[in-house]
Image: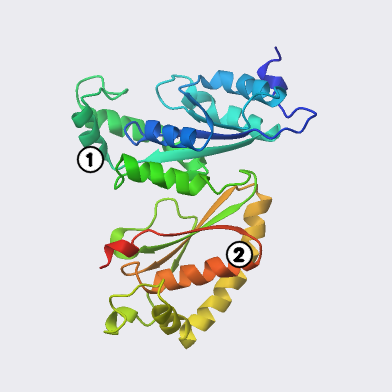
Amino acid sequence: MAGPESCGQSDKGRLVQTVVITGMSGSGKSTALKAFEDLGYYCVDNLPIALLPEFLLLTDNSAEAPTKTALVMDVREKSFLDQYRSIFTRIRGNGFHLEVLFLDCRDEIIVRRFSQTRRRHPLDRTGDILSGIREERNRLRGLREFADRIIDTSNFNVHQLREAVITLYSSRKRLDHLMIHVMSFGFKYGVPADANIVFDVRFLPNPYFVPELRHLSGCDKEVQDFVLGQHETAEFNKRLTSLIDFLIPQYRREGKSYLVIAIGCTGGRHRSVSIAQWLKSYLTEKNEEVLLSHRDMQLEE
């Protein structure tokens, strides 16, 4: 068997697409792994990171091996945080398409989840769950910055997290191709943790203050006509597309596989939704691979 240094694509050019699921303990990694299994990925929990190059080499050289794999790796394995950067970088440099998905969650939610399940936090040595969580968060700071994709699961139950993973990955054709996720949101509910680019459209006239539009959303034609018909919107969209057209090739050149463009207004129901819908159509016409979601639209009834 070849050693880790020989990890690379075979002459067959077979593409093994790999998602490494990592993040905070109690953030839902097991639930995410099950969602990937439902999507047809070959799934492994807690594979030692030193074995990952060998594992990928085997899948690359076997005609019967899966072409899509998902693996959970985290602080349960002592050498993971010391080796992930060098091993992941080498794997990518050898032609494999590896994406790091980091699951995060607020401290108080993690405490509640561990209390409900009566499980022991892997870094809790004194019976103080919160101190273990804070130590883990500190240790994972570099890994979080290294990740390709971050999902904050604080407001998700297991069903919502499963749906989010399936939505994000079911439409992926190849992980090495840039997917653009256009997301609308409301600033009153917080800026999306995984956003790469954030645009604030709260300067646009607000349909909320038009009685016949208040209970509609940016998915409705009446609201879209109102928002997109403003002079300010036309000027903003012209500048927005000019910037996006410049940025996308730069992200693609750097090998990024996932780009999150977040459009925010006050409540995430009217203006941001309208602009996100418009931007999705613009990018689709340019043959980009685009995913659209409206994070807070249903919260503003």
Reply above or below: 73 against 141: above
Q: What's the CA distance linking mark 2 and mark 1?
A: 40 Å
Q: How many marks?
A: 2
Residue 28 appears in which quarter of the rendering?
top left
Residue depicted at x 39% and y 41% = 162
The quadrant of the rendering that contains the N terminus is top right
Disc 1 marks a residue whose amino acid type is Glu
Decide which of tag 2 and tag 1 comes sooner along the chain: 1
Quarter residue 67 falls in: top right
101 relative to 53, above or below: below
- The residue under label 1 is 108
Q: Position of residue 95 (x, y in %)?
A: 70, 35
State the mark number for residue 147. none
Q: Give the left or right position of residue 53, taking residue 292 as reference.
A: right
Left or right for 290, reference 107: right
Q: Residues within 10 Å of mark 1 (few under 14, many from 20)?
A: few
Disc ID at residue 284: 2
Circles 2 and 1, Cβ within 8 Å, touching? The answer is no
Q: Dot 1 lies on which element?
A: helix
Q: Position of residue 60 (x, y in %)?
A: 69, 26
Vertically, is 130 above or below 249?
A: above
Residue pictured at 54% horizontal, 25% vertical: 83
Q: Residues within 10 Å of mark 2 (few under 14, many from 20)?
A: some
Q: Amino acid at mark 2?
A: Thr
Q: Residue at x 48, y 87 (%)?
A: 231
Q: 272 left or right of 280?
A: left
Residue 137 picture location, percent across and down: 35, 35
For the question of whether residue 244 can be seen, the reply is: no
SS at mark 2 in the image: helix
